[in-house]
Amino acid sequence: MSNKKKKTIDMTCCSDVHKQFDKFANGKVQVGELPKWMHVNGKVAWYVFQGPYGELGSKGFSAFWKRFGEAKLEMDGPPGDVYVCSPECHEEDRQTKMLTIIWCPIK
């Protein structure tokens, strides 16, 4: 496969997710329901972490909990995450633009 063809595949394999969630990347915690395709039910606080899986624990979850606390929200169950991008889709950018949704049910 040529590089040109591979780049096209890499950039489009999760483009719909990026259209929907890039505007929230590494920003504030959002509150509401997530899309049904994520299989997360009910009202949750959610955060879009943009970065490599290797930094999900050290940067992603720490940023989520900091912003969760700043928003003065109250947990109503254990947190979770949804991997909405495949690492293969982000080989070109070394996963720096990969998205993961971190969420927690709230009261």
Image: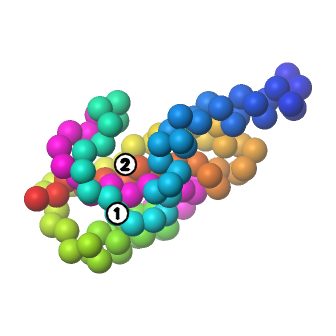
Q: Is residue 56 visible?
A: no
Above or below, 56 against 2 in this view is: below
10 Å neighbourhood of mark 2: few (<14), some, or many (≥20)? some
Numbered circles on residues, count:
2
Indicate whether residue 53 is drawn in magenta: yes
Q: Is residue 29 magenta?
A: no
Q: Mark number for residue 29?
A: 1
Q: Quadrant of the C terminus?
A: bottom left
Residue 83 position within the rendered picture, expressed as x and y whole percent measured from the top left: 45, 42
Instruction: Tell me the element at label 2.
Output: strand
Residue 14, position as x, y percentages in the image: 57, 35
Q: Which mark is residue 81?
A: 2
Question: Which residue lies at the image location 71% right of the left edge and 28% below the top edge?
Answer: 9
Residue that extends furthest to the bottom in the rendered view of this protein: 70
Residue 92 falls left or right of residue 62: right
Residue 30's quadrant in the figure? bottom left
The kind of residue on which mark 1 rests is Val
Q: Quadrant of residue 92?
A: top right
